[in-house]
Image: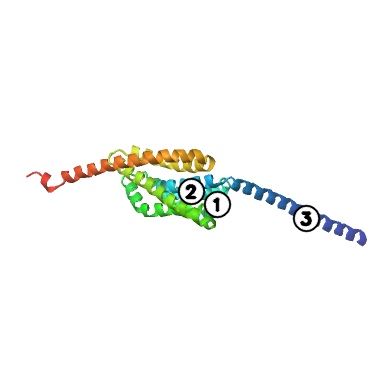
Amino acid sequence: MDAIWTTFVEWLKGFGAQAGQQAVDAGTQIGGKMAEGVGAAASHLDMTSLLALAAALGWASGFRLYAVVFLVGSAGLAGWIPLPEGLQMLQHPAVLAVSGSLLFVEFFADKIPGLDSLWDIVNSVVRIPAGAALAAGVFGADNATMAVVAALMGGTLAASSQAAKTTTRAAINTSPEPFSNIAMSLVEDGLVVGTVWLATNHPLVFGVLLVIVLVLMWIVTWMLFKFLRAAFRRLRALFSPESAPA
């Protein structure tokens, strides 16, 4: 009886070891296939895709910096976008928690007339350098030359979109009704999502559209700047001592 029991125990041990080894082998195969999938996805990020991603991050940061950080980090964590090594810190839970909290605050602050312009002024010192840093992170330290080029490009694009956003909101706030302000804010929210998606899926189309949009933005910014300057002159003349009744 003891011999039968011993034989049965030894058989269980052998069966368990064999099953465990098969599980390890299966896990290794699955892990290898996942690694191959990630590698294949990352291989699609050629120079054109990397430049498009860098431009998208810089340009969108001028509108919604915290939305860009949270969106890209979440997409990378979910495996929707193969993030370059220099941007993988955006997937960290601490970064996602902070950017998500600031995104929540900005979503509502950006839709209140007056407060949105104040929010833009305060965050203007953050958006431009952050846009440059995010664009540079696309190439990382392995390609220092392209990282510098991307930083210059990202900072310039962030400054352009920031200027367009600030002047547009200041002009809209001259109207007493809040609906145009809310509508413009929702358009900017959609622009961030659309920009990141288009840059990662259709980089060439994104590049062409970005050039067109930049030209239009510069024209609109200049026109709105002239409008605001004339409006400020009229207000200053209205409240000047010379215009006061005798």
Query: How far separated are the C-alphas under marks 3 and 2?
Result: 45 Å
Give the mark toward the camera: 3 or 1.
1
Q: Secondary structure at mark 3?
A: helix
Q: Residues within 10 Å of mark 2 (few under 14, many from 20)?
A: many
Q: Position of residue 1 (x, y in %)?
A: 93, 60
Mark closer to the chain start, 3 or 1: 3
Residue drawn at x 35%, y 49% as measured from the top left:
120
Give the mark toward the camera: 3 or 2.
2
Can residue 143 be seen here? The reply is: yes
Residue position marked by numbered label 1 in the rendering: 84
50 horizontally vs 161: left or right: right
Q: Amino acid at mark 1?
A: Pro
117 horizontally vs 84: left or right: left
Q: Amino acid at mark 3?
A: Gln
Q: Position of residue 12 (x, y in %)?
A: 83, 56
Q: Secondary structure at mark 2?
A: helix
Residue position marked by numbered label 2 in the rendering: 54
Q: Residue furthest left?
A: 246
**From the viewer's perspective, is residue 156 above or below residue 175?**
below
Mark closer to the chain start, 1 or 2: 2
In front of the other: 38 or 204:
204
Residue drawn at x 92%, y 61% as measured from the top left:
3
13 horizontally vs 103: left or right: right
Query: How far separated are the C-alphas under marks 1 and 2?
Result: 11 Å
Q: Position of residue 68 (x, y in %)?
A: 46, 48
Q: Position of residue 96 (x, y in %)?
A: 50, 53
Q: Residues within 10 Å of mark 3 (few under 14, many from 20)?
A: few
Residue position marked by numbered label 3 in the rendering: 21
Query: How far separated are the C-alphas under marks 3 and 1?
Result: 34 Å
Mark closer to the chain start, 3 or 2: 3
Residue drawn at x 53%, y 49% as measured from the top left:
74
